[in-house]
Amino acid sequence: MRVLAVASEIYPLVKTGGLADVVGALPPALRRLGVRVRTLVPGYPAVLAALPEAREVAVLPRLFGGDARILAGRVHGLDLLALDAPHLFARAGGPYADAAGADWPDNAQRFAALCRAGAAVALGALEDWRPDVVHAHDWQAGLVGAYVSSPKKRPPVVFTVHNLAFQGKFDAAVFAELGLPQGSFNVDGVEYYGGVGYLKAGLQYADRITTVSPTYATEITTAAWGMGLEGLLQRRSGVLSGILNGVDDGVWNPATDERIAATYDRATVARRLPNKAALQERLGLDGDPAAFLIGVVSRLTWQKGIDVLLDGVDGIVGRGAQLAVLGAGDAEFERRLRAAAAAHPGRIGCAFGYDESLAHLIQAGADALLVPSRFEPCGLTQLYALRYGAVPVVARVGGLADTVVDANEMALAAGVATGVQFYPVDAHMLDAAVGRAAALFADPRAWARLQANGMRADVSWRRPARRYASLYGEALASRAERRSRRANNGA
């Protein structure tokens, strides 16, 4: 089976979050199942630099203000198609925003171009390759389904929502530039609250919709978590499912990780201690091997519950614990974290920005990994924590609820607990959860069991890849059945 994936970022070339990790790790896992994936991504400078010997496989003239072409190449074991459109992507800054953090003013055009290129490949623009299925990721690829909606002989589209909060909503004036049929600007098309909704279009036109955890798939059909799209998701619930993310267990493997101070595995978990010492030194924390060290690796946003974390800082420190934070986001949250670190020297250490090596060290050196998200489609950081023996302390929402087994009395007695859950997401319940985790940490045998259970859990892409391969097959069979019915009705 041939699959075209369309996404705005891919690890290790371009990454702002978990989307890139998924897009980069899923194709190799699918390859083992006989599914061959080619991934179309924007031709950012970092992408083109990684493909110096790429060959031109298609030309797309007059694509939103300039000529473009599609380049094909292979890097880091990934088969890539890069949309080389210098007028849209050859610029300094991030994929979605400039160096100052302001969204690029032409994001509507930039990612519509990506979708049009994806549609062109889906419909046969490449001479030697045509996909059986298209897999579009998040709002940046949401228009692919709209662009291929008319042709009868088109591949089915699977659309994955990584975070419903990011919707790609643009002014209605953009519609005239998109090249879509006039009739598609309505409630059953791309129109969304008077504008153009890229993610809404993805949900509307997809043959199958997935989210990155089963619980999140249920949550987003409710008014509380549907972000204004719950009605559409309820109508399309028959094609909606949740497939848990996995992690690249080659990149995230404490036994071979070159980014950490000391390697270890489940049988040698005591060897984690040099990582704790290295982390404490790196972030200016007191070098106390007995301190309960809590790590946080997160975007610093309201969604991630960082305000709740800040409200609970005094309680964490009051328990004698240390806090190691890595992240970037809301300027006010960064300011408050700096103030907390200054108020508690040696107990709170912070690093702001994106640092892959430090992220690995926190997973390897922290005793616990705190994730106080208000909602979480899946979350990867708690999966890394399980793999690295950092016991997750998580809000009971979305993929966090699906991946961490709470250390309640029954789970402890059955020997299956892997972490601590709490709900609702407020400072009081966070403090209670930290208290439970601290009590378990004070019992070395109980803590060792939690670590062993987590490190034993299969958080790889093996099972999710099988689910995606099966879903692709279902989408293909369903589309073939519809074509057959149309042919019989026309006969």
Image (cartoon, helix red, strand yellow):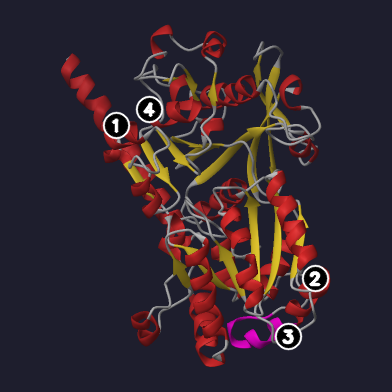
Please name the residue shown 41% across and 62% down the image. 402
Please provide the residue range marked out in magenta: 264-273
Label 3 or label 2, whichever comes before in sequence order: 3
Q: CA distance from mark 1 to mark 2?
A: 64 Å
Quarter the N terminus occupies: top left
Q: Which residue is mark 2?
A: 345
Q: Which residue is mark 4?
A: 204
Q: Residues within 10 Å of mark 2 (few under 14, many from 20)?
A: few
The dominant secondary structure in magenta is helix
Q: Amino acid at mark 4?
A: Gln
**Residue 121 sits in quarter:** top right
Left or right of residue 487, residue 340 in this image: right
Q: Which residue is mark 1?
A: 480
Of residues 77 and 237, the one drawn nearer to the viewer in this rendering: 237
Q: Nearer the viewer, mark 4 or mark 1?
A: 4
23 lies above or below 263: above
Position in image of residue 142 (x %, y %): 49, 29
Q: CA distance from mark 4 to mark 3?
A: 53 Å
Of residues 179 and 419, the one drawn nearer to the viewer in this rendering: 419
**What mark, if any, has residue 384 been given in the picture?**
none
Q: Which residue is mark 3?
A: 289
Q: CA distance from mark 2 to mark 4?
A: 52 Å
Q: Nearer the viewer, mark 3 or mark 2?
A: 2
Q: Nearer the viewer, mark 4 or mark 3?
A: 3
Secondary structure type for disc 1:
helix
Q: Nearer the viewer, mark 1 or mark 3?
A: 3
Q: CA distance from mark 3 to mark 2?
A: 17 Å
Q: Amino acid at mark 3?
A: Pro
Label 4 or label 1, whichever comes before in sequence order: 4
